[in-house]
Each structure stands twice: as C-alpha cells, then as structure tokens.
Amino acid sequence: MLVIDDEPEIGRAVRLGLQSAGFTVEWEDRGQAGIERVAQWRPDVILLDLSLPDLDGVEVCKRLRSWTQTPIIVLSVRAHEADKVAALEQGADDYLTKPFGMGELIARIRVALRHAAQSTGAAEGAEGAVVRIGALEMDLERRIVTVDGRETHLTPTEYEVLKYLAAHRGKVVTHHLLLHAVWGPDYEAEAHYLRVFINQLRRKIEPDPSRPRYLITEPGIGYRLREIE
Amino acid sequence: MAQSLSQRLAHSTPWRWLRVWLTESPRSGALGYLLAPVGVAAATVVIGLTESVARISDVSLLYLPVVLWLAMRYGRGPAILASVLAFFSYDFFFIPPLHLLTVGEPSEWLSLFALLATALALGHLTAVVRARAREAEESQQRTEILYHLAQLIATATTDQQLYDALSQQVVSVFAPSGAHACALLLPDATGSLQIIAFAYEQGYGTCPVDARPGDASGQPAARDQHTIVRTPLKTTRGVVGSLLLSGAPAIRLLSPDVAGTQGDTAPEPGQEERAREQAPLFAAFCDQIALAIDRAALASEAMHAAALRESDRLKDSLLGSVTHDLRTPLAAIKAATSSLLQSDVAWDAQERHELLSSIDVSADRLNRLVGNLLDLSRLEAGVAQPELDWRLMSDVIASTLDQLELSGQLGRRTLRVEEPGDLPLVLMDQEQIQQVLTNLIENALKYAPEGSAIRIQTCVVEDELRVAITDQGIGIPPREITAIFNKFYRVQQARLPWSQKRPPIGTGLGLAICAAIVKAHGGRIWAESEPGHGATLTFTLPLTTDRPQGGLPEIAESATPAPPSTPATRAAAV
C-alpha cells in the first residue's frame, strides 16, 4: 500500500489505521517520488492525494496508468468534483472525500484489491453468472433480474446499464464512461437524461427508490452499484 | 450657514446697491432724460392755460407732479433735469419781464428758488424711496431664491439628485444674466475633477455650443461668443469642487474675482446690468452649493464609518461565535487524546471507546463548521457562482441523506421522503443545493426530539419545484420567522416560553447560507411554524420551460453482443 499525500499528519493517521488492519504501508509526500516508489516497490493499491505540491494529482494518475494497472484510490477535499472526474477518467479506480472514516477507506481498498485480482486472474465470467447485491439478483447468463426473488422487467437498455455497473460493482462509474459504454460516443454529454434514466431504473430494482440502497449516486461524478452481501 | 450668508449679503449689499443705483440702465435713463423736457413743457402749457383764465399764486407747484413722477419712474437724474428746466421755464414764461431770463421783482426770485429747491428736494427724496423700494423688492426675490435653494438642498434624497437640482437651479436663476448651461465638477477618488451634474436652459438644446438658436440678427451664434466661467466652490475646509457656467459674455460679471474666463466679446448691456445685480446672489449661491457638497461628502463619510462599524460588529460576532464553536470540539479532542496518551493509566475497552467516540464526533462537528464558514465566505465574496446543471431533486435528497447517515447524525429519528416518481429535471448547482438540504435537515434534527419523524416532501407547484422539510420540534416564535435566515441569528431560550429545553447551539450560519444559495438560484425560502409543534422550512427552485424533456434512446441490440445461446430480447420478454 503506497500513500502519496503531502500532509504528514494524514500520512501518519492513514498508515497507522491501515497497518492495524494488516496492510503494509509506505508514504511519499511528492508526486514524482511517489511514481518512482511505485516502480520500485510495486504496491497493491495506491492512495493518491489530488493536491500535491510538485505534480497535479490527475497528471500523476495519467503517468501511472501509462505503465501500471495497480488500483489507484484518489483522496481529495470536497468541492473538487471536476478533478475527481478527471482522475477517474484518467484511470483512477475510486475516490474518497476528505475527511473520511478509516472503515470506509479500508472497504474501498478491499474492493479495489478484489477488482485487481479479478482482472488479472480471470475473465468476468469466472466470477459466476449470478451477481447478488442485497435482495437484487442478476443472472447474467439468462439475462434475468430478480428483486426479492421476483422477476423485474427491464428494457434491454436498462439491463445493459445494470450489467455494466455490475461488472464494475463497488467502484464508481462516471456518467461519461457509462454513457459511452451503453449508448456510444454520441451520447457522452447527456448526463441529465442519464439521471432520469437511472431514476426509472431504480423504481424497478430498489426497495425504496427515494433512498437507493444498491444504485448509489456519486454527486457530480457518476454512479456506483454497491456491494452488499 | 445662514449666518455667514446673511453676513455676506450685509457686507456686499450697500456698496453694490449704490453702484447699481448710480449706473442705471442706459435705455430707461435716456428715456427719463427725454421725458423730462416733455413733461416740463406739458406742465408749462397747463400753467399757461391756467394763467389765461385766472391769476393763481404759486401756480408753479404744477411742475412738482412732473418732477415727482420722473423721480419715481426714472430716478434722480431726470428729476434734477426736470427741476432745472421747470426753474427756467417758469422764469421765462411766467415771471415778468416775460420771455426773458431775468426777474424784475426781487420777491419773484424767492418764489423761483423756492420752486427749484422744492423740486430738487422732492426729486431726491422720491428717488431715495424708489431705490429703497426696489432694494426691498430685490432683496425679497433674492431671499425667495435662496430659500428655494435651501429647500432643494434639504429635500434631495440622494447626492446625485441634489447635484442635478443644484445645477438646474443655477441655470434657471442666472438665465437673465446670460447663463445657458451649468456643470458641477467634483474631484473623484484620484482628485481629478469630474462632471457629476449638468443642466441647460430649457429650449436651449442638449449641445450647448453648436445647437444654440440663432440670435436676433438671424446669424447663428459663433463659438467665440460663448463664454465659460469656472468658479471654485470653497468652504472652510478648502475647495470642494467647481461650478462651470457657460453662456453669454455677461456671465463673466457674475463672479468678477475669478480670472481665466474665456471670450472677450462685450456683454449685451441688459445682461450686463442683470449680471452685475446678480453677482452677490451668485456668490451666495456658490457658498450654499459648496456647503451642500461638503455636507453630502461628510454624510457619505459618516455612512462609510457606520458601515465599517457594522462590519466590525459582525466580525466580532462571528469571531465570538466561531471561537466558541471551534474551541468546544477542539477542547473535547484535546481532552480525549491527552487522556489516551497518559502512559500511567490503563483504560479499559469501554472507556477507550467513549474517548475515541468523543474525538470522532468533535472532528465531524469541526468539519461541518469549517465547511459552513468557507461556504459563507465564498457566497458573500460572490465567488461561488452556482454551476448550474440539470439535476433530479430525488438524487440530491438521497445523496444528502446518505451523507448524514454516514456521519451518524440521523440517530433514532425517522426520515420520511415523499416525492412523486416523475419529478422534472431542475437547473441547479447540485453541491450547493445539497448544502441547503444538509443545513435544513441538520436544523430539523437539532430541534426534533429523538424518536420523532422528519418529513421531506418534494412537489411541483405551478412553475416551481418545492421542497419542504418538516420537523416535530419546538418550533420558531412567530416574530423570529424571518430573522432566522439572518447571519449569526439564533433563537434565544428566553423567547421559547413553551419549551423547557435549552435550544441547541449552532453557529447561526446554516440558514443564512441556505437563503444565500436559494436566492442565487432564483428561488425562495421561508419558514412556517406552529410554536411547540414543529416547523416547516420550504425552499423552491424555478422550473423553466426550456428544461430537457426528452430521454435516452433504447439501444440497438447489437450494442453489447449477448451470448449466442441467449436471445437479447429475453430481458424484455420475460
């Protein structure tokens, strides 16, 4: 685990918290030094602060992605949504807003590690044809979605959206990426219609659409399909 | 101010009036001198006719009404001329030997000189009375004009209005002296003079130089006939500005002390006389205007000082409030950490957990406070322009509730979200509206007892989207229902007679931030409350007709190839 953050107190707190959870943690306070350390040390997960004194965090993200697929979790203060989106589109896997709870951070790290293991280990199909999120069940082979054991009727588009989110479940998917993946490049800018669309989809899969449990909005960034056992 | 004005008038008046009296209008003077022999001749004829009927002693008195009339009408000169002419006419026509300027009988000399003396005395006295009357009349006019000016100064509500009225007044009062336009110049922040008010004579046109109507001879007025006089406006504090007067050459005479006037054309005689007459009035005008400008400047300085004091007061209040709110959680954190760091105390798991929870809660509280302060300063500085985008309110509410739940603030209260399934897209800055919702819900949480319910209702009412947050707390006193949206305002315990509970502490910033954000979005925010039974805080966002009404298309089946064994339409079919 490599933490790249220029604030020593955050570095120390995160290191202590993660070490107690059983991770080995190293800390760098500069972007360039961080990149070099990744090359030498090959961490399993990189925690990257977006505001670094020497290099822009988004730039660090881009440089790392040019040669490594190591999961990157971006740390940032509130009100920098555009930076977060940029980092996610440059290949960052997830983001956390400061200040954050240690429990949340560890949960995100575990998701990132699992995804890394899946993508290096085997194809998507290997995880099994059925995805379960709480009471929501997706049978990818038969293209059937059930909620509490009851089948719910999704349009092919809704199904594709849910399938894409399920393939990246636990991770945040930006509007841009989702629109591109499902509707194609012509629709990348139609985030507002996507909101209406997701709202309709929630009515079919969420027990309480006004308080979504599975399909979560990441304000200003995109959506996340939660992992719930 | 009034005293200095009257002093000035008292000092300047006698001398100027004497001059005015001596240099009477040439035209009317000439007429007087012309009428003197005519009048005397007429009187001589009347006396001749009377003599032919009956011999009347002292018939020469018939000359006196002529002298009196001339003195009243045309002043001293024609009266003196008439007196002398009467003297000679009487001698020539009526005193024997007739038709000779000699007198036969010595007693007739006496009668003749009595006539001359009486005529001269009468002429002089009448002329003095006439001058006095005219002086009184003009003084009254002057007083009226100055009174009108003082009224203008007193009734002007804004500085600009005052300056406009002043320059307009200058033009209308000094038009007889040839003034056509007036500009008021005041120094700006850098000290250079700027025209702040301009007025011109009615019917004179907006362009004072070139658009001037032709003069009596039908020739358009030449530019060099246009005189400009700049008079400094002085008070005891120094020169506060300048008065620029433009018009006929005679206006130079309005302020004779001022050098540097333009144009060397001779003034028109009528205007020249008026200008000389109006010069003291003009001086008084300039004094008044200078004082008015000075007073306006002082008033604006006083207002500035008051604004600074108010800002200081706010800063103090902010400092007081923030210091307390920052210190409290910091003190809790410090206390807990120093306890935990004590090496000689062995905390059991339960105690350690309590101390750590205290740190956790305090940190969250600090985070919210700092967020609020940053938001407010950004909003007040105008930096936080809403970044508007089409959003769904239901998304924003869900995100807000998730965050609040995450920070453990919801406690054991029930949250009921009521919204129709087909809410329209609304133009908003999601982050800012989420801040509004967070503050409103936190507010409701603060006042709502444990176990009570908080209702969040969203609906479309006419052309706006309405979000109402209702709690079952202690409510808001009716008199404070609008004040709660002010900065640093907190409902005081003394004003909550129905509640035994002390109101929770806050920064008094949350609702002020809400109001600022909603206003920036073109919406409204208000509170309703039934004291003792809770409160409803509602805000609206405008629904515009140009909102996106379409949707994303259904994708073609081939977009994501399905496994060959499974028909792609299955999902829709089952």
Image (cartoon, coloured by chain):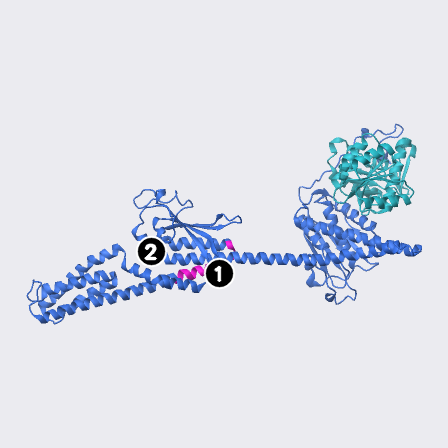
Chain colours: A cyan, B blue
Residue B559 is marked as none
Q: Residues within 10 Å of mark 2 (few under 14, many from 20)?
A: many
How many marks are shown on the rendered structure?
2
Q: Nearer the viewer, residue B439 or B159?
A: B159
Please state which amino acid type lies under the numbered disc 1: Ala
Which chain is disc 2 placed on? B
> Where in the figure is residue A109, as x and y percent of width and height?
87, 40
Mark 1: secondary structure = helix
Give the residues in magenta.
B143-159
Q: Nearer the viewer, residue B45 or A100?
A: A100
Would you say A167 lies left or right of B163 here? right
Q: Nearer the viewer, residue A54 or B188?
A: A54
Quadrant assignment for the N terminus of chain B: bottom left
Residue B276 is marked as 2
Q: Are marks 2 and 1 on the same chain?
A: yes
Please state which amino acid type lies under the numbered disc 2: Arg
For disc 1, the marked residue is: B154
Q: Residues within 10 Å of mark 1 (few under 14, many from 20)?
A: few
- Taking the view exactly as shown, the residue that stands out farthest to the top is B564
| CA distance for labels 2 and 1 | 29 Å
Q: Going 71% across and 57% down the picture, which residue do you hit?
A: B319
Mark 2: secondary structure = helix
Of label 2 and label 1, which has the lower sequence position?
Answer: 1
Single out the mark in the foreground, 2 or 1. Answer: 2
Residue B25 is inside the magenta segment: no
Would you say B6 lies left or right of A3 here? left
**What main secondary structure does the magenta stretch of the protein show?**
helix
Which chain is disc 1 placed on? B
Quadrant assignment for the C terminus of chain B: top right
> Where in the figure is residue A9, as x and y percent of width and height?
82, 46
Could one spot residue A155 in this view of the protein?
Answer: no
